[in-house]
Image (spheres, helix red, strand yellow):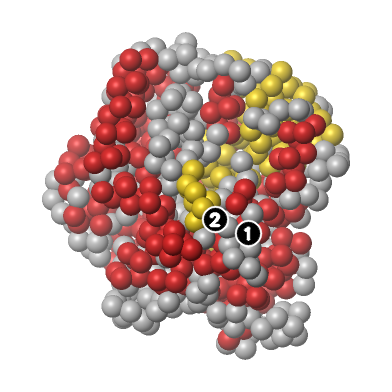
Amino acid sequence: MYGYNGKILRVNLTTKSIKIEELGEEIYRKYLGGRGLGIYFLLREVKPKIDAFDSNNKLIFATSIITGAPLPGLSRCSIVSKSPLTNGFGEAEAGGFFGSELKFAGFDALIIEGRSEKPVYLWINDGKIEIRDANHLWGKTIKEVQEEIRKELNDKLIRIASIGLAGENLVRYACIINELRYAWGRSGLGAVMGSKKLKAIAVRRHKRITIKEQNKIINFIKMFKENLQNTPSSKRFSEYGTAGSVTVLNADGILPTKNFQGGYFDKAEKISGETMKETILIKTEGCYACPIRCKRVVKGKPPYETDPDYGGPEYETIAAFGSLCCIDDINAIALANQMCNAYGLDTISTGCVIAFAMECYENGILTKNDTNGLDLKFGNKEAMLKLIEMIAKREGIGDILAEGVMRASKKIGKGSEKFALHVKGKEVPMHDPRGKTGVGLAYALSPSGADHMQANHDPIYATNVDSVKALGILNPIDRLYLGPEKIRAFTYLQMLWSVFDCLGLCKLAFTPTPSGIIKFTQIPEIVNAVTGWDTNLWELMKAGERSLTLARLFNLREGVTYKDDLLPERFFEGLNSGPREGLRIKKDEFHRAIELYYRFMGWNEQGVPEKWKLYELDIGWADRYL
């Protein structure tokens, strides 16, 4: 057995039982790992219609068949569960070192069941497992937890995934953090972990995975480094990280501004990756075995001084706390990022919730009587920082906002619903679909709610045709077009990105863009070199499609249907500023595009997979959920 362990770890926090189960090769070939393996267990084992905080919900960490191979871009680990934010399929991916460490410790996946009566943490040490008391860790920040566990276990190299105060308080968009800065951010999975009274998971190993053809992997490593040095767009990622997108999107007129009212922020330069590099950046870091080093490490300046141990803000965080809230201070944004990491809050959802509250305030829906005296006008950085704390602690208006914009708007009422930008209950990321209609499809059709990492963004369709010809996408497609050719391209690329999430691949390294350092057509070669298999792109693409279909079945079972495959009304209205002022998505075209996507996927007009499609994908066992 090469590449994977063939073992999963199952821990029941109610009964304190610990089981190690073995899986056969068939399961690994059909689901690969990551999202695929996670949804396989979630759909089969979690009872229908339970509350996400019910003890019968499960929290599943899943690596892949190639996680831990020493090739850049293979470090990502998935977590899946029923989401407390969407009431449907919940998913998050994160890089760093935790996924590889779990794999090295002997397990391909970890399934957390039940609920502990008292706070605990899990200690996995070279295949030995303990459930340890965590009363002394409850209420502490992510950094305090990491420091105390490493001190307690006398090992500074232990990798730790933990929740902060937000997870303990069941903030519906709480996240799970590893190494203080790598976040499983979306879907509120930190709140699920908190509901189980599980404060942290600590992992340590002293061995590596076995690779079938080590020489081929070494050659890929050499190729990766050479391509990185010779690819200008990849160098830009190394130089500015994802924060380099701020000025690019602003110049394009689609930088989310003032809660998506506009697409141009006149002070974008002050919060850009370039400015961050010139002012507060002190070093760069990367995930396991990766030389791209896109992660920022910053030290903000007083009065917003930050702790470099918490890393630094990425593009999504900068836009969410910056242009979306009309804040132009990179130091305040860096502190907001640190607070979210310390408390365990998803920065995208937190920024969206605050921008929502600001728009409600400026329209008189919220007043100082509602906000505990906070002046929640756009651009007020002190109010923004205070709200982060109030949300994590569920204090005052923060208790309402901790529910996410969908639930908060229903509670606040007074027309606030039109300012609540979400899909299926999950807040919209920092890419305006009015300028990238394929991103709008990704938001509407993502099984976990609005997610910008579900498929390639539209400039690829229009300008980089060579990189996607292997999928039969041979001609340029306008980024604003929503016709059949676009839907076909989107469908294929969504399947490909699903493969990335099943294999735990970093999309900066493998996606078919100018910054893609290794061609996605080489992924089967990597899988074969690690595992000794003889797979191909066809088999991997079917695995990606399989996981999307199973996630769809899970959502349908939980009551998330075609009626939820929508975009907020704001995106059918024109942008009110910038070079693309007036640009909007045409609603009738968008709805027709959704319907055509269903057909391309083998689903009926209401988005339900056809029975024949399940058998075509070799998941006939799932027809019980139709």
Q: What element carries label 2?
A: strand
Image quadrant of residue 149? top right
Is tag 2's residue or tag 1's residue first in the polypeptide sequence? 2
Question: According to the image, label 1 marks what residue?
Answer: 306
Neighbourhood count class around disc 2 (C-alpha, 10 Å): few under 14, some 14–19, many 20 upward? many
| Residue that sits furthest to the left in the current view | 475
| x 40%, y 37%: residue | 291
Image quadrant of residue 254? bottom left
Question: What amino acid does circle 1 point to?
Answer: Thr
| x 77%, y 24%: residue | 130
Q: Is 294 left or right of 159, judged from the image as shown?
A: left
Neighbourhood count class around disc 1 (C-alpha, 10 Å): few under 14, some 14–19, many 20 upward? many
Against 401, residue 152 (above or below) is above
| x 74%, y 50%: residue | 141
Question: According to the image, label 2 marks what residue?
Answer: 298
Asked if marks 2 and 1 touch (Cβ < 8 Å), the reply is: yes
Against 322, residue 613 (above or below) is above
Residue 290 visible, this orientation: yes
The image shows residue 146 at horizontal and vertical percentages of 71, 40
Question: What amino acid does circle 2 point to?
Answer: Val
Image quadrant of residue 247? bottom left
The image shows residue 177 at horizontal and vertical percentages of 62, 45
Viewer-proximal residue, 341 or 500?
Answer: 341
Residue 7 visible, this orientation: no
Viewer-proximal residue, 111 or 95?
Answer: 95
Mark number for residue 543?
Answer: none
